[in-house]
Amino acid sequence: MSVDRKEFEKWHPKDIRSMMRKEAFKEHTMKLAENYVQANLAIVPKKFALEFMIFCQRNPRPCPILEVTEPGVSTLKYLSDNADLKTDLPQYRVFKDGECIDEPYNIKEYWRDDLVAFLLGCSATFDHVLDAAGIELRHFREGKVPSIYITNIRCKPAGPFRSPMVVSERPIKFKQLSQMIQITSRYPLMHGSPIHVGDPKMIGIKDMNKIDWGDQSDISEDEIPCFWACGITPQTAALNAKLDIMITHYPAKMFISDRRNVEFATIS
Amino acid sequence: MSVDRKEFEKWHPKDIRSMMRKEAFKEHTMKLAENYVQANLAIVPKKFALEFMIFCQRNPRPCPILEVTEPGVSTLKYLSDNADLKTDLPQYRVFKDGECIDEPYNIKEYWRDDLVAFLLGCSATFDHVLDAAGIELRHFREGKVPSIYITNIRCKPAGPFRSPMVVSERPIKFKQLSQMIQITSRYPLMHGSPIHVGDPKMIGIKDMNKIDWGDQSDISEDEIPCFWACGITPQTAALNAKLDIMITHYPAKMFISDRRNVEFATIS
């Protein structure tokens, strides 16, 4: 890419996606277009789409649905009016029977008339909102990813879909805890408020140093660990179901929509 | 029924549903089990269930999903642990190709292995919450149904499902408007805050005296008309699609769940 990343971060989502479509940008999307909603992608065959959607509906905290396409439709209507999911993300992962078989930069050759795409809320947006509100997020300021853990909280199953809940952890200052919960409660479609605050053992995390994904975080004396339902959960559920095909975004390389974060603070 | 209705209103949902199952109670459910969530019912064939669910997801204000059953399953898992949708409502309506063909007290003979049931949030619960919070709702105190109108607001279509938005109207005291919006915003799964406040002409209602359903309401000088997305909308969309079969609750005879209203004030 001939443009500086710091400059590129300020581009409009339409222009950012145009670069991705040309495969001129293949990097992660953290801090890109920071006022705009980013979304996780999960594409499943129509045969399993209803049950996957029911899984999401039963587990709205890890699986907040932003948009679902009709079978065979790879373009969006609501998160953008000119996006094609076959080309407009930086990179994808293609799974067959639960195994990753490819990590392509577009999915033109994999697209089928029976595929249904789910765009799910994502914490990449979430951190921007908290940071803008003055909540101190060290990992965010340091350009790191939150620590991610598999818990012993069981999601409600649907059809072949079942998974333990995966969570992301952020240390929050005790004095900012109430304010953080007030703010995050306004964004249920971006995982909302924490599903657990405090002792990690209560949700089956025996050792905070053993992360499952993300970067290690340290917790200071004046901080309490807070845990949010994480968008990796529905991917795990879909992979456990060993579908004949499933396509997701490549981790940390999300879909960037044309909808602003603030629009999603007013859904009720 | 040998028990007095005022007494019956105080029964637990499990006992109320037991009476319905025996067809010993066939009346409307207004004011029954007032701390518990009531839900609209829409049953469609699996063939159309994914697109109907996408319609609901695209239009969450009129179509807030509380629970969806897996194909062929008539029992619930989350709104209750002992309810069967084939028998546990007071009365049903069965539609064929968009025409009502029966209004039975159970749907045992219509149940099929490919049917999917949607339980949708409902304003019967909503009025209880507002009344308990001190918002003056004349229709509620007088035992009437809100005025209901078809608007010119277009729902977002999905597959064969399309409908104008149907709204219910409640006159609210100007001095209670802010408080009412604060309270209703906490219940997005019961239609949330008003979709319109003020001049009815702005949403295509030319004459407030021409109601489409419900009871006529009068608006006093110290009141402003407030309009909420209404659960009749998804039924209208499904009827417009002329499915080979669709089953709904009989108007005002809703499903009574075992979940308390307050549980739904904390979904994020």
Image (cartoon, coloured by chain):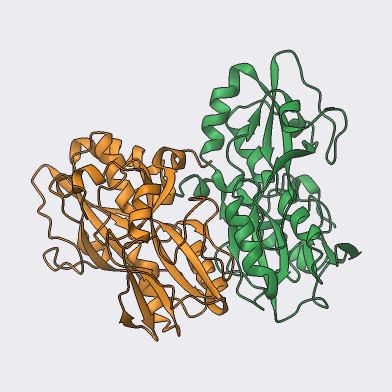
Chain colours: A orange, B green
Tell which residue pokes out farthest to the top in this image: B221
On screen, residue A246 versus residue B96, left or right, reads left
Q: Is residue A229 above or below residue A207?
A: above
Q: Residue at x 43, y 50 (%)?
A: A189
| Residue B90 in which image quadrant | bottom right
Q: Is residue A231 above or below residue B59?
A: below
Tell which residue pokes out farthest to the right in this image: B101
Count up the numbered dots. Answer: 0
Where the N terminus of chain B falls, by quadrant? bottom right
Q: Residue at x 46, y 39 (%)?
A: A263
Percent x, y for residue A108? 44, 73
The answer to whether residue B84 of the structure is visible from this angle is no
Percent x, y for residue A13? 37, 47
Along the line of sight, the residue nearer the viewer: A181 or B132 = A181
On screen, residue A245 versus residue B141, left or right, reads left
Along the line of sight, the residue nearer the viewer: A262 or B231 = A262
Q: Is residue B172 above or below residue A77?
A: above
On screen, residue B161 versus residue A176, left or right, reads right
Percent x, y for residue A248? 38, 70
On screen, residue B116 versus residue A109, left or right, reads right
| Residue B77 in which image quadrant | bottom right
Along the line of sight, the residue nearer the viewer: A205 or A80 = A80
Percent x, y for residue B166? 74, 43
The answer to whether residue B88 of the structure is visible from this angle is yes
Q: Residue at x 89, y 62 (%)?
A: B100
